[in-house]
Image (cartoon, rainbow, N blue to C red):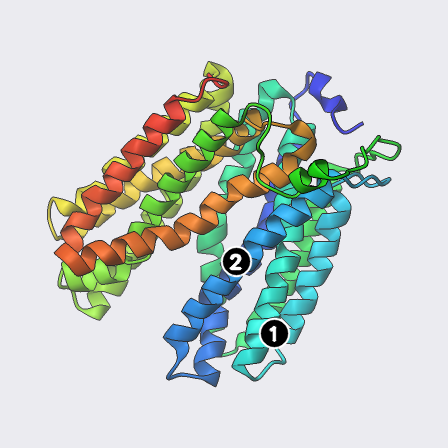
Amino acid sequence: MENETNTASKFPYRLGFGLLFGLLGWLVPYLGVNSTLLPAKIQQIAPNQKVQIVALLATIAMVVATIANIIEGALSDRTTSRWGKRNPWIFLGMISTLVCFYFLTKVTTISGIIINWSLFQVALNMMVAPLVAFIADKAPEKYRGSISAFYGVGMNIGTPVGTMIASQYITNVNNGIYIFMVFEIVFTLVGLFLVGNGSNKGETVTKLHGSELIEAFSFPIHGDIRDFYLAVIGKLLFVSAQFIITGYQLYIFTDYMKLSDANATHNLSIMSIILLVAGVAFATIGGPLADKFHSLKLLVAISTLVMGLGVAVPAIDPAPWTMFVYAGLSGAAMGMYNSVDQALNVTVLPNPNSAAKDLGIVNLANSLGQVFGPIVASMIIGAIGYRMMLPAAGIMCLVGAILILMIKKVH
């Protein structure tokens, strides 16, 4: 049974490192290709329309990923096999994404890229939702924060590592994609090996009819949904505030702080290093702190407040030092938040039998926040300038922290 580890007394290191490797297996290739190699390929094919095409791809990807995440997560919840309910989907997702990556090296038209990237989102989400559900399936409750921390460390490593690898292949996109394909195979298979097969063959799966069928593939409407939606909205505000800065950080240096492109690039590099170091450091300690003090809700709320302070700091002075302070505070906040957030999400699930589907819905806060944040920022910048978007992001975090503290099910 997949929940047999709930009675285990030893810390499940294999599960933790399996989650870490499995996450890096899809996250590093996805971020490296999505943020750097895909735009580079688009620039080669259609340099005059690249900005509009990248925006169109992001929108399409968000819509497809939203639908795929819910459906594939729900199907995973209802899978029985000798390899468990999650592993078959993750393995199938790996094979499917590799096929999409391969054909991405062959396409030579924008329409081909759009079709390929839409199919890639379907394939990718076969891995995303089931992987997170391992925390609900296998992590003993007393170690849930620490296991979630492995996931958080991976989240904080994924972005800079993916970008660093991809930046070496901007002029040779196909070779970069091949490197990421090898990376994905190795890390995903190691992750699956470490987690183990966890056979659930023989597990009873209730047949779905009428309203039950609709509920299995939709947002939860029954059970203890109050805390669930408080967590979802709190996460949405946190991510939105983060991407108010992230989406415009280059322009903050050039347009708000009036730096040259060369100085902006230099300061962006310093900021990225601060974000990485602070993020990984606090992601490492967040989970163990949550388990020790039994304070998931408090740590998530504090992280959200610290993020709010961080995003507001550059409003004090249009100088690079304020962005470095932001990087330190927000890096620490993201590290701590990512390390305990998934444990909080698992705890507020309204129905453990639909863990992957509901965690997929929680994950929508990430996707929507990455779009909602820049939209809010662009509206404020257009109306009253860069300076006021910074405290606005801080207020979003304050509201998010209050919502998290309103959760009753979690200490």
Describe residue 84's horizontal placement relative to residue 70 as left or right: right
Q: Classify 25 as above or below 32.
A: above
Describe residue 96's horizontal placement relative to residue 59 as left or right: right
Q: Where is residue 63 shown, x and y percent of the image?
A: 52, 58
Q: Residues within 10 Å of mark 1 (few under 14, many from 20)?
A: many
Residue 275 visible in the current orientation: yes
The mark found on residue 262 in the picture is none
Q: Classify 220 as above or below 192.
A: above
Q: Which residue is mark 2?
A: 63
Secondary structure category for the residue under label 2: helix
The mark found on residue 104 in the picture is 1
Q: Kindly indicate the quadrant of the structure image that contains residue 278.
A: top left
**Residue pushed farthest right?**
202
In the picture, the quarter occupied by the N terminus is top right
Q: Kindly indicate the quadrant of the structure image that contains residue 346.
A: top right
Which numbered disc, 1 or 2, marks the residue closer to the eye? 2
Describe residue 331's horizontal placement relative to residue 207 as left or right: left
Q: Give amino acid for label 1.
A: Leu
**Which residue is pictured at 46% across the width and 53% down the height?**
159
Secondary structure category for the residue under label 1: helix
